[in-house]
Amino acid sequence: MTVDAAELARVDTLLDGEAPADWLACLRRDLPGRAITVCDAADLTEGRPYRDYPGFELYLVDGSGHCWSLTPDPDAATGLLVARRRGRVVS
């Protein structure tokens, strides 16, 4: 199941501006069954974010093959990678 426009809109709502302290729990609640991975933005050395937010970068992940890879295409994306910029705390 690929990432759709409604899911991306929900991510926009949660991460654009001042994200709530429980943003990750909200994403997992609102996007049931969607693979959501979190890392520090400094850990990513390749690829460009699909979207930038004040405290986060959003990457799309294609998990359809043997190995996961980053993709710029929502129609190929099966999961989300949220990279936190320094200074953000995961709840």
Image (tube, helix red, strand yellow):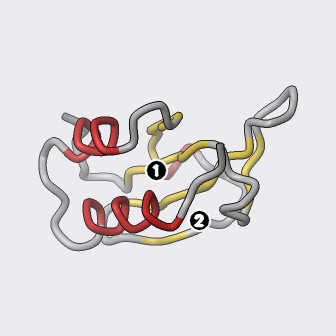
**Spatial separation of the CA atoms under disc 1 and disc 2:** 9 Å
**Residue at x 16%, y 67% (from the top left corner):** 18
In the rendered image, the residue lying farthest to the top is: 66
Q: Earlier in the sequence, mark 1 or mark 2?
A: 2
Location of residue 6 (image quadrant): bottom left
Q: Nearer the viewer, residue 58 or 35?
A: 35
Identify the disc placed on residue 57. Answer: none
Where the N terminus falls, by quadrant? top right
**Residue 30 horizontal/vertical position (percent):** 30, 44
Q: Amino acid at mark 2?
A: Pro
**Residue 2 horizontal/vertical position (percent):** 65, 50
Q: Amino acid at mark 1?
A: Ala
Identify the disc placed on residue 83. Answer: 1
**Residue at x 80%, y 36% (from the top left corner):** 64
Callout 1: SS: strand
Please state the total of marks drawn on the protein image: 2
**Residue 11 horizontal/vertical position (percent):** 37, 60
In the rendered image, the residue lying farthest to the right is: 66
**Residue 53 horizontal/vertical position (percent):** 37, 70
* Crowd tier of the residue under label 2, counting other residues whose Cα lies within 10 Å: few below 14, some 14–19, many 20 or above: many
Identify the disc placed on residue 49. Answer: 2
Callout 2: SS: loop
